[in-house]
Image (spheres, helix red, strand yellow):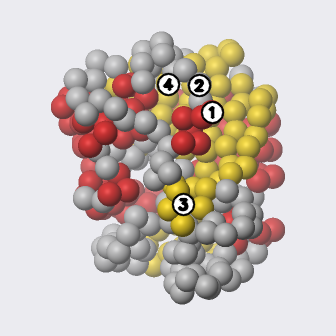
């Protein structure tokens, strides 16, 4: 993957460009083993092992799932007993598929979907909140230029005592070239500066799930946010950090030589070199 580091000035086409790539990804992901829908259709869906071990019982909760894609995890939370789950995503195609799945599974009364970009969430979800939990996982916040605003929106959506659950790829791992490691004994090369991530623009992006052709949508934008920025945004929004965990596994092949692990995860094949993911809970 060839990423162009730029300054942090938000490009005027960032939202339209990213929406186009995510509209296109929906069809790819419906054909990918990485988004296997069989467990969901059989009523036995589970989240990834990290989330399963950390989020606790969701029975009876009202949950906002931000950047929900086509709703697989949204519907899983509903199957796990949430009273109401509202998924929000910028992709019209993703929301269309999510609504079809909710109807197919008989969950449309408890799982609904709203098409809107993240920064429009307070208005788009005004009639659905406040929520007991805001759920954000895996490759979500990197598509956002302004984390302070994101955290304020999370806080606005939560009821007093409600909590944010966030699980993401670890910024420390993002400094490496994800195309490295094609050979079994090759480790990823350090390529990007952790202390000055900035905005990254990728031309003709590939999808992260497998050997699909380049996306036709053109280009996309990504912001690598260091941990200090993430934690400071959460704190500045008035949320209290309950806990913070680091993990040696991640739910996609971040590097080609990572070894498959139980629960559709990937981890270092030998020693635990550095964290591949982190998770946190913060309360209002």
Q: Position of residue 145 (x, y in %)?
A: 62, 55
Mark linked to residue 56? 2
Seen from the viewer's position, the closer of residues 56 and 269 is: 269
Q: Badges 1 and 2: C-beta atoms under 8 Å apart? A: yes
Q: Position of residue 177 (x, y in %)?
A: 62, 78
Mark linked to residue 63? 4
Quadrant of the image occupied by residue 22: bottom left
Decide which of tag 3 and tag 2 comes sooner along the chain: 2
Q: Residue at x 61, y 69 (%)?
A: 269
Looking at the rendered image, the quarter that the C terminus falls into is top right
From the viewer's perspective, is residue 177 above or below residue 25? below
Decide which of tag 1 and tag 3 comes sooner along the chain: 1
Is residue 244 visible in the rendered structure shown here?
Answer: yes
Q: Residues within 10 Å of mark 2 (few under 14, many from 20)?
A: few
Residue position marked by numbered label 1 in the rendering:
54
Q: Horizontal placement of 267 versus 212: left or right?
A: right
């Amino acid at each position: 993957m060839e990423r162009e580091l730029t300054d942090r000035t938000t490009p005027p086409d960032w939202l339209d460009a990213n929406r186009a790539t995510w509209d296109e990804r929906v069809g790819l992901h419906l054909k990918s083993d990485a988004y296997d829908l069989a467990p969901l259709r059989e009523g036995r869906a589970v989240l990834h092992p990290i989330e399963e071990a950390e989020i606790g019982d969701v029975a009876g909760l009202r949950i906002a799932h931000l950047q929900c894609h086509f709703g697989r995890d949204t519907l899983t939370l509903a199957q796990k007993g949430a009273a109401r789950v509202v998924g929000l995503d910028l992709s019209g195609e993703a929301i269309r598929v999510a609504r079809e799945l909710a109807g197919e599974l008989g969950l449309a009364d408890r799982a609904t979907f709203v098409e809107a970009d993240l920064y429009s969430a307070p208005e788009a979800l005004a009639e659905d909140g406040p929520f007991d939990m805001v759920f954000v996982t895996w490759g979500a916040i990197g598509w956002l230029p302004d984390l302070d605003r994101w955290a304020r929106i999370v806080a606005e959506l939560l009821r007093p005592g409600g909590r944010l659950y966030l699980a993401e790829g670890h910024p420390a791992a993002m400094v490496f070239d994800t195309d490295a490691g094609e050979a079994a004994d090759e480790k990823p090369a350090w390529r990007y500066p952790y202390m000055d991530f900035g905005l990254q623009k990728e031309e003709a992006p590939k999808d992260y799930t497998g050997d699909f052709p380049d996306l036709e949508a053109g280009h996309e934008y990504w912001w690598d946010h260091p941990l200090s920025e993430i934690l400071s945004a959460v704190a500045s929004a008035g949320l209290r950090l309950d806990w913070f965990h680091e993990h040696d596994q991640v739910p996609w092949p971040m590097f080609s030589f990572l070894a498959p692990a139980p629960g559709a995860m990937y981890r270092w094949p030998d020693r635990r070199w550095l964290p591949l993911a982190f998770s946190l809970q913060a309360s209002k």
